[in-house]
Image (cartoon, helix red, strand yellow):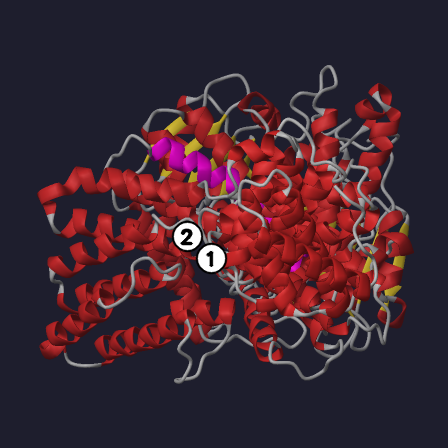
Amino acid sequence: MADLPRSIDEIDSFVARSQEFLLRSSRSHPIRLACIHNLATALLDRYALSDAADDLDKSIVHLIESILLPPRLWLEHGPMILHTLWLLASALFRRSKVSGQPEDAIFAANYLRYLLDQPRDVSGVPRRLVTTMLVDALAFQVSLKAGNPMQNIREMAVLCPGLLTSDVSDGDTTRSILQFSKAVSSAIRPWVPDQPLDQVIECLRLVKMHKPELRDAQFALAFCLGTRYCMTFVNVDYEEAASMMDEIIASSSPGDSRDEYVARVQRFVTGLAFIRSKTHRTPEYSEETIYRARAFLSSPPEEHSFNPLVNYSLEDTEKQRFHYFGSVEGLRARSGDSLVSRLVDAFGRKDEDDDSEFGRVYKKAMHLEDILSWIQNNDVMEIEEVIEDGRTTLASFDRGSSFTFYILGLFGLILSEAFKRTNEIRYLDESMSALSQVLEYPFARHIRLGILRLLSWSLLTRSVRFRGRRMQDVDEGVKLLSQCVNDGHASLPDRFQLACVWASFARVFRHPSTLTAYENAISSMQKALLFAPTLQQQHATLATMPDYSNRMPLDYASYQVNQRQLEEAIETLERGRALLWSEMRHLRTSIDQLLEADPDLGHKFTAVNRDLEDLTTSIPPSHELSMDDSAADDLRAVDPFSRLLLKQRKLLEERDKLISQIQTLPGFDSFLTSPSFDQLRSVASCGPVIIVNHSKWRSDILILLHHMPPSLIPTPANFYRRASALKNKLFASRSRYGLDSSHYDQTLAFVLAKLYKLVGKPVIDRLCQLKVPEQSRIWWCPTSVFCSLPLHAMGPIPSDDEEKRYFLDLYICSYTPTLSALIQSRNRNLGSRSSERPSLLLVAQTNPSLPTVQGEIQVVQALNTKVTSLISDAATPAAVIDGFRCHQFVHFACHGTLAAGEPFEAGFELYGDERLTLLEIVRSHLPTAEFAFLSACHTAEVTEGSIVDEVLHLAAAVQYCGFKSVVGTMWAMVDEDGRDLAEHFYKALFSTTSRRDQGVPYHERSAKSLRFAVKKLRKKKRITLERWVNFVHYGA
């Protein structure tokens, strides 16, 4: 080929000569091919200089003409045809970009593909340059929405990795990568099937590795990861996407020329966080959403069309926080969300004129919501006509839409509500059909749990009311409930409650999954408790759960008893009761053996436990956590409560990892696992423990012995109802007439007599059969209503003489919240000597409302042992806690108070307005403490509105923090009884007349001493029944 001209004049002259030659020569002329090729090239050069569209068009015509010449002409020129195809592809692509039409770009891409398929390169054109142009042409098609965008993106994802290691100029490679990234960002969409996300993500990860400075490529990668998360809900995709977008935001600066770009990144990551919080129902994800939403709303531009959606999402997420934890940081309960609100959550509110796909969905959804509201609030006479309207709306909807599942879900709710109003089975059947279709949509993850729950309810309802398909419906309903329970996206409290429902239904129908359901429920109960960060909120979580959830451990134990699995039943009751105390005890578990086996692991575990205990016993939300600054900076907290929550999650994760490591050590495989029966039975080494399980399925009395299998005392069928009635009768009389009324005393006498027949007599008979002698020590471990009933005072017991005898006359009674609590109370303090009299701390308040407390003070101060007195203004909470640490015994003589629904606010009234609360006591750690005499009101009484099986009262708190034996009161006490009881109690305690007591630690003599004092009090003239029944003993 001849040298081509360079200037416009030269090109004009060359074009004229070439055109003249072509007019005179035949198509078969041997140099015609070269002439046409050179003419086309010259026209392209002139177009580059003059931008004349006519030159570009003529160039393309001549290039096509040259290709269509007879094949024999090409034989002499060899590779020229490849170069011609390259020029034609370049010209076509150039014209396509000028015209904005895709046809030329499509042809250009076909030619470029052909060139890449050839075994040899185009002369003078590196192969990689052909690749960059093909990528550009494909990206251009995507921008025009021409051809098959996903196929084009898939092809680009295959081509681009080769460019990253090419010798093509950095500018060409960078341009093509950016075009690919922009094409991806513009075409990839959440909830659209058949997108090449995996290939694109792998390609863009290579781009990030080789060209980390390309922010558009990073955004495209993050966008694709986020999109894939919205379709698969795999959390690692979210984490990677969010991390990259945070890098992009952090790399920008105020006044950045790409502020709108940064805002786009913020919008996407904020929306993605919200989707995750609705899909994975975990509090830390909700907190991240709140953090990101507030960050977005506080960043420029302050006014943006996306702001209303972010505001709405923020409100909804804060509502979710309220649902989890109650009122925090001024949050208020809001109305529940519907499927329409879920649509709004995801895509924003729409006006009536919006004709987008979602706008049409929104209008239909609103119409169906109106139908649902009508069915709920109107007469059922016209219900069929209204439902037919809903059917018409559903039929008119495009089933290929990504949002079909919303419409199906709403229609299923309408039909379910219609069934509830009419009891027409056909509505229930049609509802289940619609709801089942929702589950076929993989993008319906955020409403899946609600749909499964409603479907299982429908199946089990149909099995009960309409027996035609009974067992098939039960099988399907139970299967769906098990899916709910094992759904890792659902919140732990939801999964726990659904496991309880599953267990209950399975047991009703005698389904073979009953045991599995119960085991799922008991296993998830503790995890559900740790869902909240502090003790107060953990108790609130339990208190707001349905009754069937709180009863579940008792019901499970009753099921095991029914299966003759007595040892397993005892293990279950230990796992499922007093969860708050159990978890706190785990934080104080002894690690002496661990420190010997692995000191480093032991110290790490101790540090994490200490931080967790500080956090768990804190008072949200204002409590300042003691953590280093670097740890605090890692937490994206929007307020003090959020900081508390996120810190707890971090500590729990670290603790779980440490426990897993510890359990791999030789001999530590059972570290912090639930205690086995063999471990629990050791609690009966000093006397039998009597467990009273109160379950509506069946109630039982189990006697735990040290060297024998548990002894079962079956109860009559009406045991559950009778026991509940006794508790209700006692409480009603106390509430209406007061403790000091004759009516209450008569009611108490009635209750004690009935309790004797219901519980006392069967227990006494069995103890006799077991050869447990009278005057032995026994421990009561009650459940449910029995936690509030005075089992120690059951009677009177029929006898031949006239003297009234009660249960405590035959046996020395104590109580224990759990078996583990009693085992811990039996651990004797290192260095303590049973022969030495203990030092005693006296905490007392003298005021007109306690006229005889001075006499009680004198009784205690006169004891033949070291007594330190904190009286009146000397008794501050801090002084009392300090005094705990250096005394083995403590005696309180003051007012005790309860706060309805707030068990951790129960406390001792000290000087002025100060109080020593249950929570403050729990924070104490007193390894040398032994005995506490709580001569105050309500110290062993569970607060109204509290969970009785959690045993949250002052006596249990004092026992938890280290005191091994405690004397407390079941209700308000009479002031003068404190003085009289203390006098007789300490006289018996420090008496040395009994050989049997010699060598026994003084705190272990306290139960017997209390019985002696109570019997003395009982003989006092004009003493009412409630006054001596009031006093109880806890612990060793």
Direction from residue 394 to residue 661 in the image, left or right: right
Q: Secondary structure at mark 2?
A: helix
**Magenta segment, principal secondary structure?**
helix
Residue 428 to residue 764: above or below: below
Closest to the observer, 916 or 651: 651
Residue 709 x, y percent position in the rendering:
46, 19
Q: Residue at x 71, y 16 (%)?
A: 667
Type of amino acid at the residue the image marks with label 1: Met
Closest to the observer, 216 or 372: 216
Closest to the observer, 22 or 687: 22
Which residue range is magenta in the image? 514-536
Q: Residue at x 74, y 58 (%)?
A: 14
Residue 359 x, y percent position in the rendering:
41, 75
What distance separates the C-alpha of mark 2 from that of mark 1? 18 Å
Characterize the local packing of mark 2: few (<14), some (14-19) or many (20 or more) Cα atoms within 10 angstroms: many
Which of the marked residues, 2 or 1, is nearer the chain's N terminus? Answer: 2
Q: Secondary structure at mark 1?
A: loop
Q: Which residue is mark 2?
A: 449
Is residue 22 visible in this depiction of the protein? yes
State the residue lying farthest toward the top. Answer: 666
Q: Which residue is mark 1?
A: 545
Type of amino acid at the residue the image marks with label 2: Leu
- Asked whether residue 732 is drawn in magenta, I would say no
Characterize the local packing of mark 1: few (<14), some (14-19) or many (20 or more) Cα atoms within 10 angstroms: some
Q: Looking at the rendering, in which quadrant would you find the N terminus?
A: top right
